[in-house]
Image: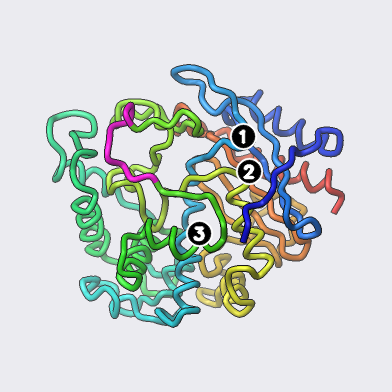
Amino acid sequence: MDRLRTQTLEPARFVRTMRALDALVAEGAAPGAVMGLWEAREPGVCRLAAVGSRRIVPSAQPMEERTPFDLASLTKVLATALLTARSVERGLLSWDTPVQSVLPQFSSGSGIRIRHLLSHTSGQPAWKPFYETIRDRLGEGATGTRGLEKVSIARRQSLMRELVLAVEPEAKPGAKAVYSDLAFLTLGFVLEEIWKMPLDRAVEHGVWNPLGADLRFFRVDRGVEAGRRPEYAATEDCPWRGGVLQGQVHDDNCWSAGGYGGHAGAFGDAAAVLTVAAGLHEGAFLSHSALSRMWTRVDEPPGCERTYGWDTPSGDMPSCGRHFSPTATVGHLGFTGTSLWIDLRAGIAVTLLSNRVHPTRENERFKPWRPRVHDALREDLGY
């Protein structure tokens, strides 16, 4: 599939949207943002709007429509879940494959199947600070990163796998839904085994290249200053890594393991995100059968709002707002201030990318703006 052509979101048509985006920046919810829209009725085009700054520390840099972002947990759907579905279609896995049959060292994971990892129902914990152990065991010196970026990525990845697979589940598979980075880290290890290559290369080969999506992982093999990419949206001014992250992954565990994982690490701009969404909606990558499985809420536990990889609208005010179909919408959020929502009934995909963690992750003002901006866009569209 070809990458989508880009056009600017017309201010005269999207008055409410532009007003909401400008207010988001003015009120300090994020230094800047890019919003992207794809419509099935014009499938080769996406429309983009950029506001604010891609960096404010240590100096100001303007946001641009083609600014790439640290997509954070959008990696789970844009990379890991899609490579899993591709693996199922190729007969390398099934949704019901026992994880232990691929990873025998996962001795505590008896009963966990691929579908449990995808739907966050494996019983594994939500998160663990693995980066602290990796830094302490492999780093040198007494402060900061302790030279961790100088350690081979293979060694860091090996230790991350050892640590993740040693964690005992907190519940039986299928008993409850807990959004879990550990589940997707585990899934990444499974995919490495069956594709016989590191996850970042497998995703590039098996998902992004076939879709024509300009997404990428950046391996962390240098310090923050040396690894800075000024054209990228900045994230945190990180105390323990010693500077502003810009083009190096924000997620602590992913950074410590070398820059890629099943849960985080993907970078890309709004057009690339929408290229994936359009390819899926148009049936250009996965079969209808696979997509139907991926985009249907799981049966166990009852009331679970997850699908195989994706989230669905939930709560009194979903992050996609009031106007996306409650029963025909899938999407995902990312910690850095990113999101993708696809309304299958309306035939639209919307991505909102921000750098709300710049210069600090303590900024909590972004959350209420997600639904406000999506509501404004849908009201401007009129459907």
Label 1 or label 3, whichever comes before in sequence order: 1
The residue shown at (63%, 57%) is 2
Label 2 or label 1, whichever comes before in sequence order: 1
Judged left or right of residue 132, residue 377 is: right
Q: CA distance from mark 2 to mark 1?
A: 7 Å
Labelled disc at residue 33: 1
Identified by mark 1, the residue type is Ala
Front residue (pair 59, 42): 42
Residue 225 belongs to the span the image colors magenta:
yes
Looking at this rendering, what residue extends furthest in the top direction? 59
Residue that badge 3 annotates: 209
Looking at this rendering, what residue extends furthest in the front direction? 2
Identified by mark 3, the residue type is Asn
How many marks are shown on the rendered structure? 3
The residue shown at (51%, 76%) is 300
- Point out residue 364 in the picture as x, y percentages from the top left corner: 53, 34
Q: Which residues are magenta?
A: 218-226
The residue shown at (63%, 62%) is 279
Residue that badge 2 annotates: 352
Q: Secondary structure at mark 2?
A: strand
Res 140 quadrant in image: top left
> Can I make out residue 125 in this image?
no
> Can I make out residue 291 in this image?
yes
- Point out residue 372 in the picture as x, y percentages from the top left corner: 71, 41
Judged left or right of residue 120, residue 256 is: left
Identified by mark 2, the residue type is Leu
Res 245 quadrant in image: top left
